[in-house]
Image (tube, coloured by chain):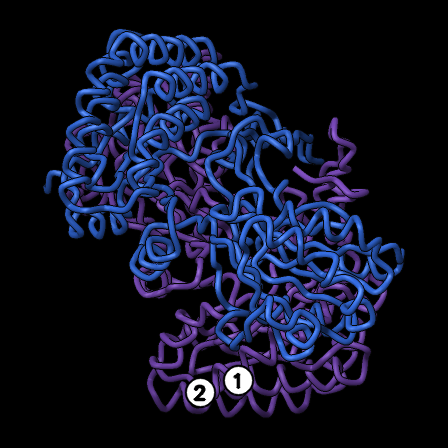
Chain colours: A purple, B blue
Amino acid sequence: MTELEKTGAAAKAAGRVLSVAGTKKKNAALEAIALALEAGSRRILDANAEDMANAEKAGLKKSFMDRLLLTEERIAAIAAGVREVAALPDPIGEVISMSDRPNGLSIGKKRVPLGLIGIIFEARPNVTVDAAALCLKSGNACILRGGKEAIRSNSAMVDIMREALAASELPADCVCLVRDTSRESANELMCLSEYLDVLIPRGGAGLINAVVENAKVPVIETGKGNCHLYIDESADLEMAAEIAENAKCSRPSVCNAVETLLVNEAVAADFLPMLLPRMKKYNVELRCDEKALKILGKDAVAATDEDWATEYDDYILAIKTVGGLDEAMEHIARYGSGHSEAIITSDYARSQRFLSEVDAAAVYVNASTRFTDGGEFGLGAEIGISTQKLHARGPMGLRELTSSKYVIYGNGQIR
Amino acid sequence: MTELEKTGAAAKAAGRVLSVAGTKKKNAALEAIALALEAGSRRILDANAEDMANAEKAGLKKSFMDRLLLTEERIAAIAAGVREVAALPDPIGEVISMSDRPNGLSIGKKRVPLGLIGIIFEARPNVTVDAAALCLKSGNACILRGGKEAIRSNSAMVDIMREALAASELPADCVCLVRDTSRESANELMCLSEYLDVLIPRGGAGLINAVVENAKVPVIETGKGNCHLYIDESADLEMAAEIAENAKCSRPSVCNAVETLLVNEAVAADFLPMLLPRMKKYNVELRCDEKALKILGKDAVAATDEDWATEYDDYILAIKTVGGLDEAMEHIARYGSGHSEAIITSDYARSQRFLSEVDAAAVYVNASTRFTDGGEFGLGAEIGISTQKLHARGPMGLRELTSSKYVIYGNGQIR
């Protein structure tokens, strides 16, 4: 057995205990974890300082360092997040359906944990605790594998969580960390089919693609977001400009930000000049097709075909004029990542066609794509946003970390 | 573009049309298919006769030939199956949830098709039509790839279905067949991530394992069934013998048949002699651990560890004595495939522990595992039995061939 297989076996066994632990024990463990993180903040900050010093030596860029940094406040927020998860309703044990069959069998369908969840993520050490808390609450053991730059911070936090679990009534192995941060360990984790029930990658497109390409464990793809905003000829242009600004500029680094604006030719000459000052405020680079470029002139540059396929995650917006709804939907079908798509319109029939025909996790009429989020959708918490259609689609909360089980009560039935 | 990529693109485009086609058009197409299959039975039987002749030349075994054979009656049954699918409720468009958020957004969650489904299967040509009908009704296009031994039969049936679709109001490419039956074409299909939303293998363990090992498309694993029956010390032994006979002998080749009997030591000496004549009736080979062998003597043989891990799909039963419920559940956790597991008991607490702690798609008290089936569970039809926990678990009906989509109605909301 390799080191990771041993971890897999231990976590799987812990998961069996956790799966039937009941809400009270799980919530008590979460509260113990929150307390332990607060009490252990010095230990976490010391470990994080080492990670930060190494990152600085390695010359990693500022935005990366920002994500890596932990502070007293951030640790307090992480602990508060754990308590929020404890306060959420327990999804486990819900009876999804129950019926009596003509032969007298009672067949129920119950919500149960998935079992053992692998989570591969990048530099943000807060994911370590968030993910562990969501897994615990939903009755799942987890194996976490963070980026090598955060290994000391992650180790400190996982050690603290495991100590808290051991002191509560749940096995420490409910939360495991892969401490070997080599590429090989990531690949081994992706293929640990004997133990893992599912693998969730959280991070940039490179990580997601590597996991989808290499994993033998079932994967839930998250977070690819090439999102579009289509301005219909009947749109309230003031609303459209307001939503475009919000969807692009309120937080361009996240997956629900808009990357390409599609604008109906009939209103492009009116709309784009209205949009321009809002984009200038944030120094957004505008990459335009020919017609839009004519309207915006020196304030824009020419787009290439590659732009339509790119998730910038930055202050860049691609702009394309289209002849109508069909052309807009064709473009979205070709380039969209199936995350979030919006139409701004005052036309009823076109709003309905957009909602029905555009194939994405979330489709909007007259609202910003930035709302695609577990909290905003009322799920209470989120482990990621699925852009695949299997198992879960869109923001994934606790319920998306569960499976089901048929429970059949008989009294001697044979077939 | 390869031939298969072209098929993928065409089927994906057809799927977009089908996804919004509505129940009436889909049912009309299914009825047209049923009629066309009946009208075209001569063409199908001629093609099947060629397949049968080749199979005979190749010296394939009788059970294989039986599965390959089509007759007038079987074609009539296949057409009737299509009409049954047409009569089922349409899962598409169901609103799963809908709520208004404090900011005025109305957020609905709707049931939508998965998109394009790949199905890889073995020799049974009836699967071709069954699978296509279930996909059509649930709004999904499909690419079918059957075994090479049935290629002529499958081609004839798919041609007939495509003609019927073209004559109805749906694109023929809603149902596509991979006519190249080389191993390479199977591998290419497993990696057609750009077009396929999911891949469902239907067949023996070899096929399932090859798909799980090689696929880059999300897979739903089906049909692995190493099922157990545990006879508790409090069991009604007459009921236990009746259920054991049914679970083993009523159809040993299917995945919900029992492979290993676990019997509590306290009742083994009473129970096994009661079971023996029922097993002798079917010439079932009994492979026993030491204690059971002592009881059954010359009527049994010694089991090896390999027996506990084997899905016989045959008139063979492994028998193991256990000290109690915990040992039985340990054995099931170690060797079970997560399909169907049953306890025979009159003890309330142990029945509840078994239902709660055994991790399988279907867990039974006092009934035969043979009931794990879409029809028996009231799903109306079945495309397979999932033994994984992601997306679908247990018998998969039309609903399991769907995904969901968030539909958001706003009036200018920004975040």
Name the residue at 19% across, 41% down.
B148
Question: Are dots 1 and 2 in contact, CB under 8 Å?
Answer: yes
Element marked by disc 1: helix
Image position, residue B236 (x, y; %): 84, 53
Is B272 on the left or on the right of B352, as rendered?
left
B122 vs A168, nearest the viewer: B122
Task: Judge the density around disc 2: few (<14), some (14-19), many (≥20) Cα neighbours within 10 Å.
Answer: few
Q: Chain of mark 2?
A: A
A164 vs B53, nearest the viewer: B53
Give above or below for A247 relative to A188: above
Name the residue at 89% across, 58% down.
B347
Is B82 on the left or on the right of B395, as rendered?
left
Work out how far the residue at label 1 is from the one at label 2, CA to CA, in angstroms: 6 Å
Q: Place residue A401 in its image quadrant.
A: bottom right
Q: Place residue B288 in its image quadrant.
A: bottom right
Query: Quick check: can you spot residue A396?
Result: no
Image position, residue B246 (x, y; %): 64, 45
Q: Chain of mark 1?
A: A
Label 2, on which residue? A2
Give above or below for B73 relative to B335: above
Image position, residue A177 (x, y; %): 55, 81
Image position, residue A384 (x, y; %): 53, 55
Label 1, on which residue? A6
Name the residue at 39% across, 14% down.
B30
* Residue type at numbered disc 2: Thr
Count of marks, rendered view: 2
Query: Quick check: can you spot residue B366?
Result: yes
